[in-house]
Amino acid sequence: MGIIKGNNVLGKNIEKHNHTLLVEKYRSKTLDSYVGNEHIKRTINQYISQNDIQNLIFYGPAGTGKTTLAKLIVNNLNCDHLYINASDERGIETIRDKVSGFASSASFKPLKVVILDEADFLTIQAQASLRNVIETFSRTTRFIMTCNFVERIIDPLQSRCQVLKIVPPTKGEVAKHVAWVMNKEETKFEVEDLKTIVNQYYPDLRKCLNTIQLSTQDKKLVIDKSVLVSSNYMTSILKELSNEKPKWRNIRQIIADANVSDFEELYRYLYDHAYVYASCREGMVAIHINEYSYQSNFRIDKEINCMALIQKLIELK
């Protein structure tokens, strides 16, 4: 999410504490209040002044403001828009029925925009169908896609879009914003507890705020260690993979001890740090991570899928 000048498993528990999620309450409401990515903001402002945009793909780590930016764009255009979360509706029927139906419908506004959030969850067939819809309705409809892994978007779609990387805010900016939110909420906190949460979840501002909301009792931040995943588990995995002869069993134990549930975060970390444990073979790392990360969406036991990836990475040594 974007920072103002922050739904995972925690979401259900958060709603018990407060009907208003902090990530929504403090989501950026204007483009000027969206901090960071100034070069992208300049481009978007030009589009808004013309009341038209190119087809766009925003990609980057989770919780860094991709969806916020997409919503800010449609809120500043004279347009009708459709929002779809592709992690929930990833099949070809979504494109054929909802997207195509919206694009072909009558409108009293000069432009229509489709936001496909988490578009990297769309099946290959759905993406191929989307390409046809983009071409068919290119005169009246624009498309904004967000994704964590742009490698999962097929080349024919990428070639029809302006692909923009969303750069996360610095750790200091995240900490400053989180402290600002807690002060606005009149929540008392210890600086060390704030550091613990930011270090744990950076650059995912959404998780930082969700964790704070879950951990606030009687206007005071009280960290429940059982809620936080061990902040060192990913670095421990990286260290093991960097060994001359990494042991699969050791990594399995690290993951079990940390009670990992968010494997997408681990996949991204392994991708970003491939140069540490697989120098000169980073391309193969990307291929394996892309394959197993995609398969994870359809696996009941995501830990087994992850450990199969780990074996592939070890074989690269």
Image (cartoon, grey):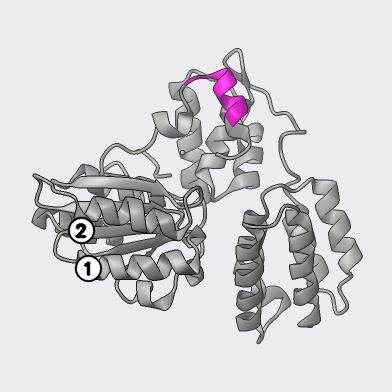
Q: Which residue is at 49% across, 20% downward?
A: 19
Q: CA distance from mark 1 to mark 2?
A: 9 Å
Q: Is residue 208 magenta?
A: no
Q: Position of residue 230 (x, y in %)?
A: 76, 45
| SS type, badge 2 | strand
Q: Crowding at label 2, few (<14), some or many (≥20) Cα neighbours within 10 Å? A: many
- Residue stretch in magenta: 12-19
The disc label shown at residue 141, or none: 2
Specify the quadrant that holds the C terminus. Answer: bottom right
* Residue 247 screen position, x and y as percent: 89, 70
> Percent x, y for residue 136?
22, 68
Q: Which residue is mark 1?
A: 136
Q: Position of residue 190 (x, y in %)?
A: 63, 27
Q: Quadrant of residue 275?
A: bottom right
- On screen, residue 292 versus residue 173, left or right, reads right
Residue that sits furthest to the bottom in the current view: 280
* Residue 40 visible within the image: yes
Q: Nearer the viewer, mark 1 or mark 2?
A: 1
Q: Is residue 188 visible?
A: no
